[in-house]
Amino acid sequence: MTTNEPDDATTDAQREETGNAADADLTHVDDSGDVQMVDVGEKPDTNRRAVARGTIHLSSSTIDAIRADGIDKGDVLATARIGAIQAVKHTWETIPMCHQIPITNVDTDFDVGEAHVTLTVAVETTGKTGCEMEALEGVTTGLNIVWDMVKAAEKDEEGQYPGTAITDVEVVSKEKRRIDADG
């Protein structure tokens, strides 16, 4: 039977130094093992910003259709932008233990290449916890919407998507700045 008990020879300092998550205390589990939301009530309000990005790989003909606004379902990037922002605002409803935070700004940027679309989402908040999950939700939902909008153009003869893929979803940066007492 496997346990999460640390090896007696492993010290807390060694776990911190190596960053071994398996040896770290679980933040979303209470003493009895029940899942719980982390209490952030005592943390100071902080200005926070997170940026995430990801890429969807598409055929060059689909990219050409996106650029020419020639997708039958409508404006692909405008629809994906709206969906990404909506996803950011509703992250707390879809990710268990995620706090509902006040979103102060969302920026979306699409880079349309020859065979891909890269979406970057920047999220800002002022609060007690970060907004990287919101940025990731914006990216993944925005890219899923791109896929949904272009799926008819991307299907092969068997109805499959052999060249379509969402890749490289990552948090690019995460920042926080404590609010001065003067505002």
Image: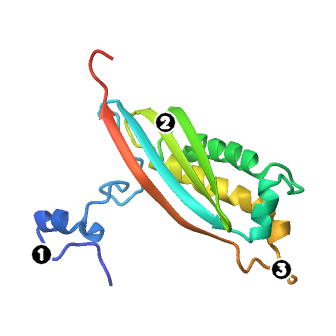
Identity of the amino acid at label 1?
Asp
Residue drawn at point x = 84 percent, y = 78 percent: 159
The local secondary structure at tag 1 comes to loop
Q: Determine which residue is flagged by label 2.
A: 101
Query: Please, is residue 133 above or below residue 176 in the view?
Result: below
For label 1, the crowd category at 10 Å Cα-Cα, with few meaning under 14, some 14 to 19 and many 20 or more, is few
The quadrant in which residue 7 appears is bottom left
Q: In which quarter of the image is residue 160?
A: bottom right
Residue under circle 1? 8
Left or right of 99 in this view: 159: right
Q: Which residue is drawn at 63% across and 42% down?
A: 85
Mark 3, secondary structure of its residue: loop
Q: Give residue 106's quadrant in the image.
A: top right
Q: In which quarter of the image is the C terminus?
A: top left
Alpha carbon separation for disc pair 1 and 3: 56 Å
Which of label 1 and label 3 is nearer to you?
3
State the residue in front, 113 or 133: 113
Q: Which amino acid does label 2 sit on?
A: Ile
Q: Quadrant of the N terminus?
A: bottom left
Residue placed under numbered mark 3 in the picture: 156
Is residue 96 visible to us here? no
Cβ–Cβ below 8 Å for labels 3 and 2?
Answer: no
Count numbered badges in the picture: 3
